[in-house]
Amino acid sequence: MRRIIVVGQPNVGKTLFSLNFAEFLGMHTVTINFESYERGCSSKVITIAEAKSLLVSAAEHQTLDIQSMVLTMPWGKSAKQFELIDTTGLADRIDFEPQIRRAMAQTLHFMRQADVVFHLLDCFKVAQLGFLKGIGEIDYQIAQYGQLKKGYVILANKIDLTQAKDGLAKIHMEFPGNKVIGISALEKKGFKEVKEIAKQLL
Amino acid sequence: MGREIITMVENGEVTVSEALSLLKRAHAGPGQYKHELTKNEKLAAIKQQLDSLIGLHTVKKLVNEIQAYVEIQQRRTAFNLVSEPVVLHSVFIGNPGTGKTTVARIIGQMFLEMGVLQKGHLVEVERADLVAEYIGQTAQRTREQLRKASGGILFIDEAYSLARGGENDFGKEVIDTIVKTMEDQRSNLIVILAGYCAPMEVFLETNPGLRSRFPIIVRFPDYTTFELFRIAEQMLQQREYQLSKAARRRLLSIIENLKREEPRNFGNARTIRNIIEKAVRKQAVRLVHLKSPTRAQLMEIAAEDLQEVDDD
Ligand SMILES: Nc1nc2c(ncn2[C@@H]2O[C@H](COP(=O)(O)OP(=O)(O)O)[C@@H](O)[C@H]2O)c(=O)[nH]1
Ligand SMILES: [Mg+2]
């Protein structure tokens, strides 16, 4: 099964995107495989609504485990399954907490195995802080690494917020030659285009 | 190879960015990707990182000079001109929290791009990581750290503590082991001795042999009041908080006070971090009783949230 990995800095909306994208593809429940370093693997079937309240958070590093879900996408007359992997946010500094460092290492591990990378950036943050601070060294490195993959797409998130347009434009400028799609994970904007791209790449 | 790189992230030896760049290299030789940045673009990005640090003007200038020097020596070599030997082992002098580690990390990246170092990662150690309890073990332990740092930078914090116990101290064994390795594998490793001002000066004076082996001395000045203020603002911005007008005034006066009361101990970003962390917690306590705080309220740090922090 092909794998799409969702990566980015903490709080850019990776988890909300993953869950809402699943919903957008017509799923009501998701089987979430928690792959945790400490507790090994476990899987759980929950409704997407439950998953959102459980996993989406304004606090950093809510997603400490890798959460993968198997999604089905309409494919002509039939359907195609692929795995969507939500990950721990990657940060530039070396974290003091071993647990967080491990989670980041695990993200890298999955990134190596993925076929397609969805790289989320936060338009609002970029608009507010400018690209110097809104886009981290880590994002440039992800972009570089992404070039090795079958597919690499930048999802510029949170375009529902005011000012975010400005951020989207800056992101386009910063990553020339890459596919950039403006989305709102919250309002499921831009998801159609994401779906089309996913179909092409998988 | 990839697995080792990921383990380095786990052990806190490299940042995720560094790891990604290493992973990419491991995957294929450089220059084979669609959008590979050229060496110059990468160097520019690294320098940009350095420039975006608040303050540190003299440090930035010196790093630029060193970079230019290394580059010209490399070019001279390419033309078969006599080139000066490039010795990059350095001494970083400055109070805690003045940016020494951050700058070391950036320098590692810089020399990686320039081909001076193979990995460019930073291994941060202090006395306890190097000195063992029994004779003979110290050299072994030191060599272990040197091996970890091979291809990158060995950053020895509070290096003066290696000269603590006089002639019989194992600290001397550490220094001897390091100096020996430095001479064996000239270009594969950079050693940085760091520490604060007075003890470092004494350390260097009492070990005159070190001067020539660590030819680069970088002095990290204490941050000015205004620089500290900007650092605080930057930290808050990164966490998506903002200071109210009154809070800005209060923060400035807190910083001024601390500087006046403890000019020696207070030149650093660490105290600022403590103040900010405390403020964020106090703001939370202040807001937790509100039924539905607004976005603006959630972002704002008020004057009352700020107080001087005793960092003992
Ligand atoms: N306005 C807005 N908020 C979003 C959007 N996507 C995520 N968020 C918010 O950003 C925060 C972090 O989201 P989360 O999915 O947990 O981020 P993660 O750390 O990248 O997994 C949460 O408070 C979300 O509600 C979006 O498209 N628009
Ligand atoms: Mg998450």
Image (cartoon, coloured by chain):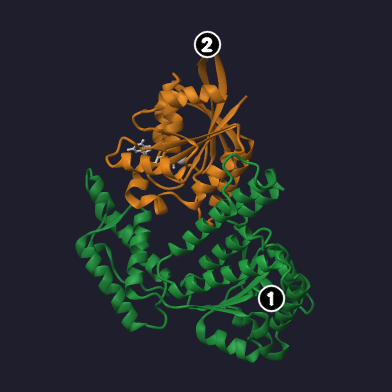
| Type of the residue with mark 2 | Gly
**Label 1 vs label 2, nearer the camera:** 1
Residue occupied by mark 2: A76
For the colour green, the matching chain is B
Residue B68 position within the rendered picture, expressed as x and y whole percent measured from the top left: 57, 69
Question: Does residue B56 sit above or below B277 in this rendering?
Answer: below
Q: Secondary structure at mark 2?
A: loop
Question: Does residue A70 sit above or below A110 in this rendering?
Answer: above
Circle 2 packing at 10 Å, graded few (<14), some (14-19), many (20+), is few
Residue B59 position within the rendered picture, expressed as x and y whole percent measured from the top left: 49, 73
Residue occupied by mark 1: B84
Residue A76 position within the rendered picture, expressed as x and y whole percent measured from the top left: 52, 11
Question: In terms of depth relative to the viewer, which is nearer, B161 or A130?
Answer: A130
Question: In terms of depth relative to the viewer, which is nearer, B132 or A181?
Answer: A181
Question: In terms of depth relative to the viewer, which is nearer, B81 or A41?
Answer: B81
Q: Colour of chain A?
A: orange
Residue drawn at x 62%, y 42% is: A109
Locate residue B267: give its quadrant. bottom left
